[in-house]
Image: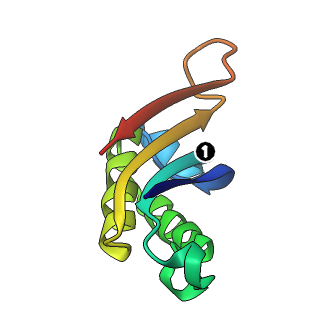
Amino acid sequence: MLYTIRLEQMEFRAFHGCYDLEQKVGNRFNVELTITTELGSVADEDAVEKAVNYLTVYEVVREQMAITQRTIERVAQNIIRAVKENFPQVVEVECCVSKLAPPLGGKIGRVSVILKA
């Protein structure tokens, strides 16, 4: 049986961007994950040690957000790969990375990319 875990509205200050200034001053980013994973015996045994650990997932995201990239597509790809490396029972990860108030020359709330693998 499969089940889904969602980590929503994780906010980070990071230095991703294609402009040099973005990589110097940074910006605020929002990350959301939807993780589909095998249930296995997690529920039957009430076995937290067999579950996908939310704290570990958050730490994986935090670590990936600390690595400066030029595109948020690369950031999302790195997050997905790292989650899957840490949890082999994960079947699919959908990752949305949003840059809040991006420097586009006008008022805009966010720009987002969504990758699924």
Q: What residue type is disc 1 on? A: Phe
Mark 1 lies on a secondary structure that is strand
How crowded pointer 1 is (Cα within 10 Å; few <14, some 14-19, many 20+) is rated as many
Residue that label 1 marks: 29
Q: Residue at x 44, y 31 (%)?
A: 113
Compared to 46, does 83 lie above or below? above
Q: Is residue 36 left or right of residue 77?
A: right
Image position, residue 58 (x, y; %): 58, 67
Q: Nearer the viewer, residue 77 or 13?
A: 77
* Location of residue 88 (image quadrant): bottom left
Q: Nearer the viewer, residue 113 or 94?
A: 94
Count up the numbered dots: 1
Image position, residue 15 (x, y; %): 51, 52
Residue 38 makes an appearance in the image: yes
> Residue at the top extreme?
106
Residue 18 makes an appearance in the image: no
* Location of residue 115 (image quadrant): top left
* Location of residue 12 (image quadrant): bottom right
Quadrant where the C terminus is found in the figure:
top left
Q: Residue at x 70, y 14 (%)?
A: 107
How is the structure coloured here? rainbow
Image position, residue 83 (x, y; %): 39, 65
Q: Nearer the viewer, residue 23 or 35?
A: 35
Quadrant where the N terminus is found in the figure:
bottom left
Q: Residue at x 57, y 77 (%)?
A: 44
Q: Is residue 53 left or right of residue 40?
A: right
Compared to 6, does 105 lie above or below? above
